[in-house]
Image: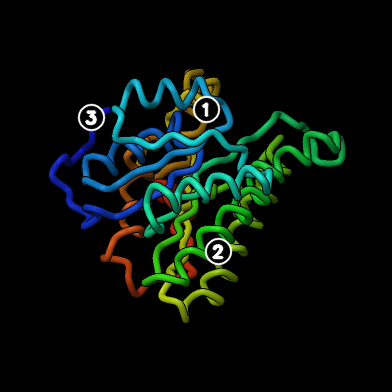
């Protein structure tokens, strides 16, 4: 992917970073840009084939870890690897998450609800807890979570997803309050729709695309770099006095 400004430097050289859901989409591009920033990068994903593809694309400097973030044993094993490879952690980027078409909330099957809550809220809690336990015993760190505009408005067929993301944003605020004494800053970025393969059924449809764009004052759907840069800002020394915040990245949609 061609970024708008290949000369941006976020001061992340040498930083030890874990990106969850790092094998595709926003997570893959975060890993790519972090490598360009000369950070030390580990990524995790549920599927080994996705990790293999990411390593083939990004190179062997990436540390791939197969793990389901909603499984406590997997998270414990992942952080054993992180500790072995990095001897600590400076930045956690909680990017992993998923959604399922679920219709109206009252018609949503419990299994679908559980999967959405697990993959988003519960997984973010487990990974953040493990990362914070490492960071509080060192010199602090940064936890940045990718939330969603769905946490701020009820959207058709996205009820469980929006609820999970709203929970993530409260988790961000609680962790920020509890971890400030250890020098750990916790923030979130909440984008509107982003042009990824995941959302292509929507933005790839001209009629739906035009309907979405009409609600965005800046007149376009977000590109991946529109999310990557704010996440890296929160991870960087530029945000050392910012914690407990949720940054809406929505092209101005929430302002009208």
For residue 172, the mark is 2
* Residue name at image x 46 percent, y 62 percent: 187
- Hey, which residue is sitting farthest front in the picture? 84
Q: Secondary structure at mark 2?
A: helix
* Residue name at image x 41 percent, y 62 percent: 142
Instruction: Provide residue 88's location: percent of width, then percent of height.
Output: 40, 58
Q: Secondary structure at mark 1?
A: loop
Instruction: Provide residue 254's location: percent of width, then percent of height.
Output: 49, 53
Image quadrant for the N terminus?
A: top left
Q: Which residue is mark 3?
A: 2
* Residue name at image x 48 percent, y 57 percent: 188
Which callout, 3 or 1, points at the residue further toward the start of the chain?
3
Total count of labels: 3
Badge 3 density bin: few <14, some 14–19, many ≥20, Cα 10 Å: few
Q: Would residue 233 be visible to someone looking at this image?
A: yes
> In the image shown, does 27 or 106 lie closer to the viewer?
27
> In the image shown, does 105 or 171 lie closer to the viewer?
171
- Hey, which residue is sitting farthest left in the picture? 7
Report the Cα–Cα distance between label 3 and label 1. Answer: 20 Å
Which callout, 1 or 2, points at the residue further toward the start of the chain?
2
For residue 199, the mark is 1
* Residue name at image x 66 percent, y 57 percent: 167
Q: Nearer the viewer, mark 1 or mark 2?
A: 2
Instruction: Provide residue 131's location: percent of width, then percent of height.
Output: 51, 59
Asked which quadrant contains residue 168, the reply is bottom right
131 w.r.t. 66: above or below: below
Whether residues under marks 3 and 1 lie with C-beta atoms below 8 angstroms apart, the answer is: no
Asked which quadrant contains residue 141, the reply is bottom left
Q: Secondary structure at mark 3?
A: loop
Report the Cα–Cα distance between label 1 and label 2. Answer: 25 Å
* Side of 58 relative to 21 (left or right): left
């Amino acid at each position: 992917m061609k970024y708008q400004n290949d000369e941006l430097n976020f001061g992340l050289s040498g930083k030890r970073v874990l990106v969850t859901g790092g094998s595709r989409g926003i997570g893959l591009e975060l890993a790519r840009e972090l490598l360009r920033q000369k950070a030390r990068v580990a990524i995790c994903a549920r599927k080994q084939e996705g990790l293999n593809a990411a390593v083939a694309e990004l190179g062997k400097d990436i540390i791939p870890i197969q793990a389901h973030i909603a499984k406590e044993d997997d998270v414990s094993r992942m952080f054993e690897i992180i500790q072995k490879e990095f001897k600590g952690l400076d930045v956690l980027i909680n990017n992993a998450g998923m959604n399922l078409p679920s219709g109206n909330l009252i018609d949503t099957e419990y299994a679908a609800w559980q999967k959405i809550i697990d993959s988003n809220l519960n997984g973010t809690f487990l990974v953040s807890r493990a990362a914070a336990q490492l960071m509080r015993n060192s010199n602090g760190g940064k936890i940045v979570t990718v939330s969603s505009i769905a946490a701020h408005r009820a959207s058709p067929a996205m009820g469980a997803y929006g609820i999970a993301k709203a929970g993530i944003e409260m988790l961000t605020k609680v962790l920020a309050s509890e971890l400030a004494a250890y020098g750990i800053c916790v923030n979130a970025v909440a984008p509107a729709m982003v042009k990824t393969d995941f959302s292509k059924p929507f933005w790839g449809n001209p009629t739906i695309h035009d309907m979405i764009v009409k609600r965005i004052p800046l007149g376009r759907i977000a590109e991946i770099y529109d999310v990557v840069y704010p996440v890296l800002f929160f991870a960087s020394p530029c945000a050392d006095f910012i914690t407990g915040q949720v940054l809406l990245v929505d092209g101005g949609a929430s302002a009208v």
